[in-house]
Image (cartoon, grey):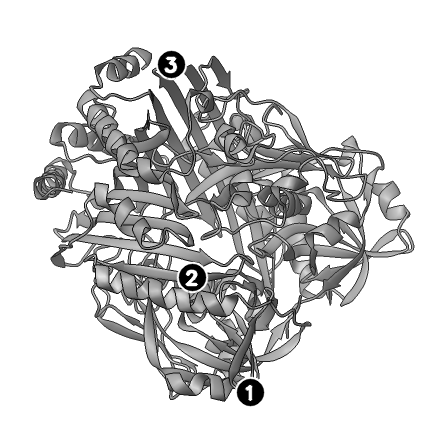
Amino acid sequence: MKIEELSALEVSFNQLIETLLIKKSENEQFTVKLSSERSQFTRFNHAKVRQTGCVADGWLELTLMADQRSSVRQFPFIGNWDVDWQLAYTALQELRDELILLPIDPYLVLPSGNNTSREIHSGNLLADELVVPTVLKLVAELDFTGIYAGGIVIKAYGDSNGQKHWFATDSFTLDYSLFSTSGQAVKGTFAGSNWDISAYIAKISEAKQQLELLSRPAKELPRGQYKTYFAPAAVADLLLMLSWGAVSEADIQQGNSALAALSRQEKKLSPRFSLKENFQRGLVPRFNELGEIAALELPIIEKGHLVNSLVNSRTAKEYQKIANGANGSETLRAPEVTTGNLGFEQILPSLDTGLYVSNLHYLNWSDRHTGRITGMTRYACFWVENGEILAPIENLRFDESLYRFWGDKLVDLTNFQEFIPEVGTYESRQLGGSLVPGMLVEDFTYTL
Amino acid sequence: MWSELKKAIASFDIPADWIGIRAVKETSTTRSVRDGLPQVNGKSFTVGAMLEVLVNGCLGYAATNSLELSYLQHAAETAYKQALAASEWWIHPFGESERPKVVGEYKSPYLEPLDALSPGEINDLLVRICQTLKVDDKIVQTIASASTIERESWFTSSNGSEVYQKILSIGTHYGATAQDGAVVQQRSNNGSQANCYQGGLELLKQENLWHRVRQIGEQAVELLTAEECPTTRTNLVLAPDQMMLQIHESVGHPLEIDRILGDERNYAGGSFVNKSDFGNLVYGSPLMNITFDPTVPGEFASYGFDDTGAVATKEYLVKEGVLQRGLGSLESQARAGVPGVACARASSWNRPAIDRMANLNLEPLNGSFEDIIAGIEHGVYMESNRSWSIDDRRYKFQFGCEYAKLIENGKLTKTLRNPNYRATTPEFWHSLIQVGDATNWQMYGTPYCGKGEPNQAIWVGHGSPVCVFANVEVFGGGS
């Protein structure tokens, strides 16, 4: 997006907030949330282009609150004041008509803070027409598949209390797989705000080396329990499950949390396992749907103990807790798992005999209340004997409880972390990612 | 709308072989209540256009959230540049045959318009559902929600296509959580968000609504003291609300031709099915008949035309156990050289169309529910999905349900909690030993089928009777 387009969006957004402040009645409060992007999406298969295009999208979410009631309208936002205001004003009128019909919400939270912020992270991305040749020339002889997604993403907020936030970032992700002729694959992600061709070359060279290991015949393993090393990308997959019915205080209170037993101190995790929210990297906005700003760091699990759940203001009001700036769905936004003592060179010797799991796939709770998760190994997973990688494995299904693999079966975590970028593009390009180490686990249960 | 879109195409100053515009306007509402108190009341409106441009066999796209002429013109130029930039690297040379001229219209059937009830009346209904679900003090949470969608789309092109489609749909969900100490059980109406249909507000009050609501609350409490599902191999009887998931994951996804061609390998995965399997592979037992059918009135993913203009018709994917054709759009059919269906769909104006499953149904055969159960000496009957996971080739799966009953000597006996089962796809479908009749055929749907890069969540429908599978591995929860 050109700088003048970005400016037009910010001007229109600010004008809209100012005008809503004038139009609102005395008993009314409002919040406005903006999500906007200009993205290029180029999809690859067999080192060719499958689909390529650009998406210019943006929407506003206006929440009106009055007389202990609230309702929401979402509508397009294009950065043209006349069009944007017309849609916003129509939404405002509709909301006024609707509110009087709705039941009272005793846990409604009104915007109350005085936070403001403005962050613009500029990037140096590939020009649109250069994406295809730049990405593909290096992998033309390989079975390369994946997606490049790049461009500007804007998240903004304003409310009737005068809070205002503007967060714009220029970034890209290249999420790819390299396949061997036998159907095994190496997965990689290359992400950032500046396209660095030498870093891309290094990434692909590294992947090519792994691909050679995958050319060996795959080993089929019987179901059973195996000592397993999970590389950081696999740990990030397991970690994401905590955002789905685990660390949310509302879920704990309402019987939906896998960490309820940890919360009640009926079960415990390993003292080696610590998790926190860490916004220091600045890759995601710190403000939430009420304009509240999360602390730069929030410990969640410390040495195996749940020290904080994610509590938004609504949950806090309902259950008499203290809010900690969590978003509406109380999900992890900038998670970091603390490192352990396992050095890179020690991984294979410490594993000795077992599985080296690079990535996981399609995780789900198989029994949420006992913390049991099922899923599949996928991409560059190996059988290791006497500290040596012998062969790739046929994919295995696992079914195991987090109270075991982050509990008494956790041997150690690596003394280094990797940043695993969020590459999701449902609704819009997601931001951020997880900072995680690898981990070594005893007796991990594989079932099929 | 037509005149504006045609005027736009006529105004584009680009040397393209073909240009198409798919404009979409969608209004959706969501209302949800927890424990009788409002959680969400909202309406979402989106409008925009997807422009596709064909240049030297290469398609480029650009999507914009404004239908003003200048925005459409800018999008067309962007799409053209995208196609040009990719032309040396394009995966297959496409032509107008993948974007045929088509003219037509499709509208969802409905009885009552989506605004037949006020937001207050809908909230009142949801509050009453929550109150009725709370049959016992051990119910610690009740939820109820209703969502509606009105979606209009206009597809027009430089070769004369004009397709208008108007889809009205409604989804309802309610459920209860029961807790006794550390034991927590959840029960819902056919699993999460499974009651999704095309139609109007008449669908908000299904037949026997209040009986069903009370039953869900009672079953949540019943599960607290139920035995764990045993770990064994036995006859597995699946209700239609679990067959929905079974068909979706282990038949629908593996038959998507874009997966077989490798498009999805970096995200959703590939398939154990190969191009050469069409017409040959014995997918399951001879009782297995699966159709792709966007023509079923009221089923969630019905339509008249796909998003590239292909005319939607009912087709057998699997007939008497043998694989016939795949879920492949005109583009996938051209690339793979195998028969497909009209299945190119996009989640909205801001995503390109890809192969999707629409309605995928298991055709009924014979056997009432009572007769089926009466014929089983030992087995487990499961209802309502609660957990799903399958590998990237759609081969090894594990699914869990909310509610189960033991079958002993032809009768449903003890209630079982935490029922799960696992198998491989071919083994499982070959073990299909009985398919129920039309009296127990039911259809469900979900708005959350995820696929594609960039990601797209889309709506699908699935119908099935009760089915029996022999010698399946079943098991219970953790400890």
Residue visible at 38% across and 88% down in the picture:
A341
Residue visible at 14% across and 59% down in the picture:
A115
Amino acid type, residue under disc 2 in the picture: Lys
| Mark carried by residue A187 | 2
Q: Residues within 10 Å of mark 1 (few under 14, many from 20)?
A: few
Circle 3 SS class: loop
Quadrant (top left, top right, bottom left, bottom right) of the N terminus of chain B: top left
Give the CA separation, mark 2 to mark 3.
Answer: 41 Å
Circle 1 SS class: loop
Circle 2 SS class: strand
Please tell me whether mark 2 or mark 1 is closer to you in this view.
1
In the picture provided, is B245 more to the left or to the right than A253? right
Quadrant (top left, top right, bottom left, bottom right) of the C terminus of chain B: bottom right
| Mark carried by residue B275 | none
Residues at discs 2 and 1 both on one chain:
yes
Q: Residues within 10 Å of mark 3 (few under 14, many from 20)?
A: some
Q: Which residue is mark 1?
A: A386
Amino acid type, residue under disc 1 in the picture: Asn
In the picture provided, is A223 more to the left or to the right than B354? right
Residue A81 location, x and y as percent? 12, 32
Residue B398 location, x and y as percent? 64, 59
Give the CA separation, mark 2 to mark 1.
Answer: 25 Å
Q: Nearer the viewer, residue A320 or A164?
A: A164
Residue B163 location, x and y as percent? 43, 16
Please tell me whether mark 1 or mark 3 is closer to you in this view.
1
Q: Is residue A64 visible?
A: no
